Image (cartoon, helix red, strand yellow):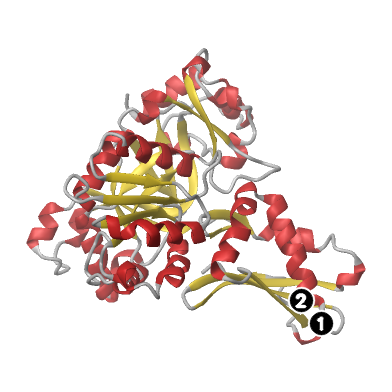
Amino acid sequence: MNKFDLFENVRKTVKGYEKFLASERKETFDKWEDIPLTGKQNYLLTYPISDLLRENTFDKCFLIGASSGFSKNGSVLWLKESEDEASYLEKVKQLFINDYSTNKKKTLVIVSLALGTWIGGMQLACTLRSLAGKTDGMVVATPGIDLKESAHIAKEFGSMFDQIVWVTNPSSINILYALLRNDKAMLNGSVYFAVVGEYFTENFREKIALKFGHSRDNVYVVKTGYGSADTGDLGIESRETILLRKFLNRHPEISKQLFDDENPPMLFVKNDKAFMETIDGNLVVTKDQFVPLIRYNTKDTGGIIKKEIFKGTGIGKELYDKLPDEILYVFGRTSDAVVFYGTNLNIYASGDYLNTLDKTYAYGGLYEVKKTEKNDVEFLEFTIFVLEEPDGLAKKYQEALIWFLKASSNEFTAKYDKLSSAASEDLIKVKTVSISGKNLAEKHHTIKN
């Protein structure tokens, strides 16, 4: 059905959506743009999950999972029917054949993602396990987020395979490299990464290619799709979209002209089963699925472009002809969440927590946080402004912030200690500074990249 028919269908059959429209106090919608936007806060977390399904369809549910970065005080438990994933295994099979020649090469697949109820990790682990059972020469290991165990498996069994395909988060790759860099067999061009969960730059992809012994132009070393537990699959990188992004990355003036940014966005072949639009810079999705979504704000910066805009840019006729007519582009998260090793953390909530600390912390009411890198490993670095001499307070704040982030996110709890152990140091860093040296006109400042 077209988008208007889907809207009318959902309006009539989904109790929660009917209540949502009533809360907007508008009954007639003369054009598509009149329909209000839904989102995680005003829709998914407002109505019970049973009210987000079409009436009398709960019996079709076969899976209960959770969105990435789910919070202990506001989780989105997500329901799936088997039809949502009917073609998923076949899609993954074709991708692994096309990208990694798993029909010809003996392949070890290591799933280094958060498992448990998180749909992304659980779905990929189950799918790849099923696929390996039907594919000669394909073996799967699922160590989850324990990267030390992941590296141990690779070292122990890697020589028995033609290649290793690691399914993980982009930010975990540099920790894995640190664990493997003294083993030359792991850096000889036989390791690939199929990644999910985070935006990454084209420079990152090329840097990883060189580290693991590939040509910087190898498009398959790090490859990803785009979607979420809420929306399902929305797009996938192809050889052509990656080559296009590489071209734009090497011609920043063209990227700036087309996207107002010298660093090009991620580019995907879009899923034709979803209708996508851009509202205030955010990607908004309409999609029919078990929990249907009408004008759902993903809070990601992105949109749809026609391939015609690349005419005359110098990309070459062969590449141009092979590009899809419409291309999905995504820059990354625009909400208050910072993506940290695949987990969405609401950093702004940290400020509210810091204000609850007792007077022994001498909190001055201000903090800054930014992502930093050391030896290509990502950290979150907090600067806390305090009312007295800061000696000895940094460790105290670090312990408090790690406790708070664990209390706020089940996924962060599952990941943090194992990731820090793999990196051999805490990934949350804290320094304390006397507030007397701070410009008090600035309340606090969060740097996300």
Which labelled disc corresponds to residue 390?
A: 1
Q: Position of residue 321 (x, y in %)?
A: 10, 54
Most foreground residue, 448 or 261? 448
Callout 2–callout 1 Cβ contact below 8 Å: yes
Q: Position of residue 113 (x, y in %)?
A: 48, 50
For this orientation, the residue located farthest to the left is 317
For this orientation, the residue located farthest to the top is 56
Q: Is residue 50 above or below residue 245?
A: above
Q: Position of residue 17 (x, y in %)?
A: 55, 26
Amino acid type, label 1 = Pro
Amino acid type, label 2 = Ala
Q: Residue at x 41, y 33 (%)?
A: 31
**Distance Cα–Cα, label 2 vs label 1:** 7 Å
Which labelled disc corresponds to residue 246?
A: none
Q: Is residue 187 above or below residue 30?
A: below
Q: Position of residue 248 (x, y in %)?
A: 26, 69
